[in-house]
Image (cartoon, grey):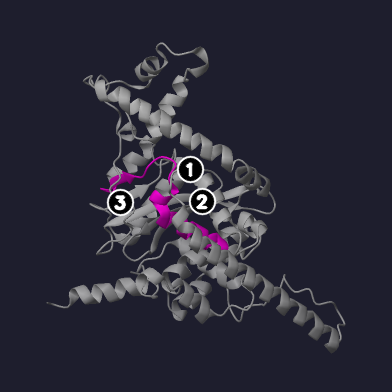
Amino acid sequence: MPRKNYTDEFRREAVELYEHTPGATLRGVAADLGVSRGTLATWRREQGYTGPRTEASDPHSDAPEGESPQARIARLEAQVRRLEDDKRMLATERDILRKAAKYFGRGDELVSRFQFVADHRDTYEVKRLCQVLEINRSSFYAWVEAAPAREQRAVDDQVLADRIRAVQKDDPAYGAPRVTAELNDGVDPDERVNHKRVARVMREHHLPGLRLRRRVRTTIPAPADQDVPDLIKRDFTAEATNRKYVGDITYLPIATGGFLYLATVIDCCSRALVGWAIADHMRTSLVTDALDMAAAARGSLAGAIFHSDHGAQYVSKDFAAAAARHGLRLSRGAVGSSADNALAESLNASCKRELLAGAHAFPGAVTCRRRIFWWANRYNTRRRHSACGYQAPFTYEASLAATLAIPA
C-alpha cells in the first residue's frame, strides 16, 4: 500500500519533478506519486517555491520563429505521421516479443531466437525480427545455412548415444572418460571418438554415469557462498503481499556517455515496485539500498522470500548479511536462465521501453534519475497491470486488504 511517511529525498525529488516537467500540474504529479495535491503544494512551499510555477520552454519544440499557419500545419501533420509510424513499430515489436516469450528458456537462448526468426519470417521482415530480438542478420543466415550440417550431427549424435547406452547397460557407473575408452577399444584410428564429444552427448541425452563415491565435506562455506535453492521455480504469484519478492539490476544508457544502474525489489503478489535504487556503479550497496527501501516501505520483510539471479552483487557476503538482517529467505534461479527471473526482467523492459519511447539513451544522468523516480511511483499508483486485474499495484493491494478484512 502507499507510504505514509516520506523521506526528505522523496519530497525534494517530487518537487523537482513538478518544477522541471513542462505542462505538469500539481494535481497530476501528486496523483502519479500517490500523494494529495495539498501535500505536494506544502512540500513545494517548504522548499522555497512560492507563487505559480514559471513554465520552461519546451526543449522538444522545433517550431521556427515567424512560422506561418500553413507551415505550422504541415509540420504538425508530419509529426503526427511520425508518431503513427512509431506507434505501428511499437505495436509490431510488442507482438513479436509476446510471441517470442515461449521460445526463451529452452536452453540455448541464442538458438531459440534464431529458431523464432525462422518460424516467423513469413509474417514479419527478417530485418525487423532481428532488430527486436537483438541478433545479427548475418549470424541468422549463417545459422540457416548450417541447418543441414546440424541435422546430420544430430543423427550422428543419436547413433553415438545409443552406443553409450549399450556401454552403460553393463557398466552404469561409467562416466565420459571410461565410456570413451570403451568405445575406442579395438577400433580403427579413423573411427575413434573424442572424449569431449562423448561428454557433450552424455550431457545432452541425460546419460551421466553413476556417482558412487561418497562426498566428504571438508570446507564449511561462508553464508554468501552457500548453495541457494530456487524457492520460486518460475511461480511469480503470491496469495498475499510481503511474501515473495524478486529483484534484478538493469542498465540505463546515458546519451552523454556511460550508464546508470537500477536495482529493483518487486512484490510477486501485487507487482508493486516496493524498493529501488539508482547509482552510477554496480557495487553491492546498489542492491542493498533497494532492499533497505523495500523494508522501510513494508515495515518488515521478515519471513519473505527474495529471488534473484546469480549476479555477483546478489551472491556476495554483504548482500547475504543484509538479507539476514531483514529476515529474508534467499532464492536463486539457474545460472544463465533469464526465464527463472522473468518477472524482474519484464519490469526492467517495460520501464526502459516506456521511458525511452524508442530513443537509444536518456539525455543526461539528472533527467534519467528524475524520470525513473516519476515512473516508479506512477507505476505503483496509476499504471494498470494485467496481473492485478488491470488495477494499479497499490490499488490492488488496498482492495486485497479490504477483501481479507471481511470475515468469512
Q: CB atoms at circles 3 and 1 under 8 Å apart?
A: no
- Which numbered dot is residue 35? none
User: Image height check: is 136 above or below 209?
Assistant: below
Q: Residue at x 58, y 64 (%)?
A: 93
Query: Separation of disc 3 and disc 1 at Cα?
Result: 22 Å
Quadrant in the picture for residue 179? top left
Magenta range is 326-353
Q: Amino acid at mark 2?
A: Thr
Give the mark nearest the N terminus, 3 or 1. 1
Q: Is residue 68 left or right of residue 311?
A: right
User: Which amino acid type is shown beneath numbered disc 1?
Assistant: Asp
Amino acid carrying mark 3 in the image? Ile
Q: Residue beneath label 1, please? A: 108
* Residue 274 in view, yes or no: yes
Q: Look at the image and say whether residue 328 sits in the magenta stretch.
A: yes
Between 191 and 407, the one lying in front of the other is 191
Instruction: Work out whether 268 lies above or below 286.
Output: below
**Mark 2 lies on residue:** 250
The quarter of the picture where the N terminus appears is bottom left
Say which residue label 3 marks. Answer: 232
Where is residue 112 drawn, in percent x and y?
50, 49
Asked whether 33 falls inside the magenta stretch, the response is: no
Q: Nearer the viewer, mark 3 or mark 2?
A: 3
At mark 2, the secondary structure is strand
Front position in the image: 8 or 324: 324
Q: Nearer the viewer, residue 200 or 380?
A: 200
Counting residues from the start of the chain, the first of labels 1 and 2 encountered is: 1
Q: Is residue 57 visible?
A: no
